[in-house]
Image (cartoon, rainbow, N blue to C red):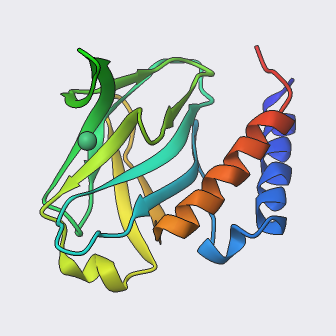
């Protein structure tokens, strides 16, 4: 499968997302040279909280491993890469310094897994529809994306659409 075909397939799939009602979140895809970011969103703030998290899929369409070092945004002075894991029967989070994305590999930041954790989030997030987020790489130019802010119900819908996408997508080795 060549890259053009794959990209077309992804675009087609994202139109399915539109049809199934995710479009109001103004879903976007970003292809920066070899990095494809899809399904990105950030959770809206829970009342009384200043911490939230963001999820997305990041695909490395290039020929070399790229290393995600983290992210920056005006909405938060501190954004960390975290991983959820079970230990002693408890769900825990730990900080991860970076993530290697191998050539042609796609990683998923998703609830109960890898995620971006935002601390000391500005209150203005409550009224925003989108935030600007910069993904920083060790060996690549930064990738700047617009990330929609999802309420819990919007997040649920988006996850259902993603599950449908995963089912409908042919395997790609
Ligand atoms: Cu976390």
Does 110 appear above or below 131?
Answer: above
Q: Residue at x 86, y 37 (%)?
A: 168
Q: Quadrant of residue 46?
A: bottom left
Front-most of 102 and 166?
Answer: 166
Which residue is situated farthest in the bottom direction here? Answer: 127
Front-most of 89 and 139?
Answer: 89
Front-most of 122 and 50?
Answer: 50
Horizontally, residue 161 falls left or right of residue 58, namely right
Q: Which residue is drawn at 59% across and 22% down?
A: 105
Horizontally, residue 4 falls left or right of residue 97, namely right
Looking at the picture, how far across and down is residue 49, in whole percent? 18, 67
Looking at the picture, how far across and down is residue 83, in whole percent? 31, 30
Horizontally, residue 56 falls left or right of residue 165, namely left
Q: Residue at x 71, y 42 (%)?
A: 163
Q: Residue at x 66, y 77 (%)?
A: 24
Looking at the picture, how far across and down is residue 16, in whole percent? 84, 58
Q: Quadrant of residue 134?
A: bottom left
Quadrant of the displayed image that contains ligand 1: top left
Figure quadrant of the N terminus: top right
């Amino acid at each position: 499968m060549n890259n053009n075909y794959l990209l077309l397939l992804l675009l087609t799939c994202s139109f399915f997302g539109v049809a199934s009602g995710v479009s109001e979140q103004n879903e976007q895809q970003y292809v920066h040279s070899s990095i494809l970011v899809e399904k990105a969103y950030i959770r809206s703030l829970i009342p009384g909280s200043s911490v939230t998290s963001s999820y997305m899929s990041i695909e490395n369409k290039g020929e070399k491993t790229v290393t995600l070092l983290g992210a920056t945004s005006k909405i938060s002075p501190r954004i960390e890469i975290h991983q959820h894991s079970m230990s002693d029967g408890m769900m825990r989070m730990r900080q991860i310094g970076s993530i290697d994305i191998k050539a042609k590999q796609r990683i998923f930041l998703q609830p109960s897994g890898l995620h971006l954790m935002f601390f000391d989030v500005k209150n203005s997030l409550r009224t925003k529809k989108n935030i600007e987020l910069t993904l920083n790489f060790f060996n690549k130019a930064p990738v700047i994306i617009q990330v929609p802010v999802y309420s819990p119900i919007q997040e649920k819908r988006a996850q259902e659409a993603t599950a449908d996408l995963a089912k409908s997508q042919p395997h790609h080795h």
